[in-house]
């Protein structure tokens, strides 16, 4: 495919296998496959691709394509937020294409102050940072779409559309990309979320972007 006449593409690829609890097998593979497709088939410069990876150290091949490594950061909550923020910054020119691909756990967490559960993506440091809650993610995606104008998001995880796919009940050899968090969120996480709730939806007309989820609300 000749992309010489297409606008530049910036990609953020996030994959986590190496959770301390309920580790996964295949998320890093997903990211490396997409990374190879972008570089080898679509001609995207490696410098335009940000990868946040955490391999499963018990896997036979924790990283199937180390030659594609480039600059790889650990997918902590802070690093995820920073990487998403850069897509709405000076590195991206309005009109550029942007792709975000997330492959790992999704979950929900209870907030005692709100007496409610909130869904989100699960960073590698979720025990301390909590989730990257949908309230946070939506604001970040909105900023990216408003800045660049062409954004596609792929969420390959559970709780990507308000529900859980519990495949263990169907096949014990399979594992859903959902991590159950039975405890109430840490105090600092509740404080962060309360601040987001006080801010409301931010007003304005939402920018348009495309999100592909691994499950629908009724699945």
Image (cartoon, grey):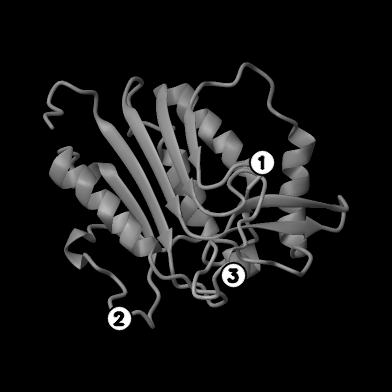
Give the number of the mark in front: 2 or 1.
Answer: 2
211 relative position to 129: left or right: left
68 relative position to 158: left or right: left
- Residue 94 appears in which quarter of the rendering? top left
Q: Which residue is mark 1?
A: 135
Q: Secondary structure at mark 3?
A: helix
Q: Which residue is mark 3?
A: 168
**Count of numbered badges drawn on the protein:** 3
Residue drawn at point x = 61 percent, y = 65 percent: 179
Of the image marks 2 and 1, the number of the one nearer the N terminus: 2
Quarter in which the N terminus is drawn? top left
Residue projecting furthest to the front:
170
The location of residue 155, given as percent across then percent down, is 49, 46
Badge 1 crowding class, 10 Å Cα cut-off, few under 14, some 14 to 19, many 20 or more, is: some
Nearer to me, 115 or 26: 26
Residue projecting furthest to the top:
205
Instruction: Report the Cα–Cα distance between label 3 and label 2.
Output: 23 Å
Badge 3 crowding class, 10 Å Cα cut-off, few under 14, some 14 to 19, many 20 or more, is: few
- Residue 52 appears in which quarter of the rendering? bottom left
Q: Mark 3–mark 1 contact, CB under 8 Å? A: no
Badge 2 crowding class, 10 Å Cα cut-off, few under 14, some 14 to 19, many 20 or more, is: few
Vertical order, 59 against 168 (above or below) = below
Vertical order, 169 against 217 (above or below) = below
Numbered circle sitting on residue 106: none
Nearer to me, 183 or 94: 183
Q: Which residue is mark 2?
A: 60
Q: Secondary structure at mark 2?
A: loop
Residue drawn at point x = 49 percent, y = 35 percent: 211
Residue drawn at point x = 47 percent, y = 55 percent: 79
Vertical order, 130 against 198 (above or below) = below
Give the number of the mark in front: 3 or 1.
Answer: 3
């Amino acid at each position: 495919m000749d992309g010489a006449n297409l606008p530049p593409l910036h990609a953020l690829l996030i994959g986590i296998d190496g959770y301390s609890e309920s580790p996964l097998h295949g998320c890093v593979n997903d990211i490396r496959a997409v990374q190879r497709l972008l570089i080898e088939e679509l001609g995207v410069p490696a410098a335009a691709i940000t990868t946040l990876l955490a391999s499963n150290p018990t896997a036979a091949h924790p990283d199937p394509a180390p030659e594609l490594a480039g600059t790889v950061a650990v997918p902590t909550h802070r690093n995820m937020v920073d990487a998403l923020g850069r897509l709405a910054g000076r590195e991206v020119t309005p009109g550029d294409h942007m792709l975000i691909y997330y492959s790992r756990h999704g979950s929900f967490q209870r907030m005692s102050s709100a007496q409610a559960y909130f869904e989100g993506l699960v960073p590698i440091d979720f025990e301390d940072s909590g989730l990257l809650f949908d309230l946070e993610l939506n604001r970040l995606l909105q900023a990216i779409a408003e800045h660049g104008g062409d954004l596609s998001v792929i969420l390959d995880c559970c709780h990507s559309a308000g529900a859980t796919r519990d495949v263990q009940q169907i096949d014990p050899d399979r594992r859903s990309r959902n991590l159950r968090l039975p405890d109430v969120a840490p105090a600092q996480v509740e404080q962060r979320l309360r601040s987001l709730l006080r801010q409301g939806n931010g007003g304005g007309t939402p920018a348009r972007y495309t999100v592909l989820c691994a499950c629908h609300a009724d699945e």
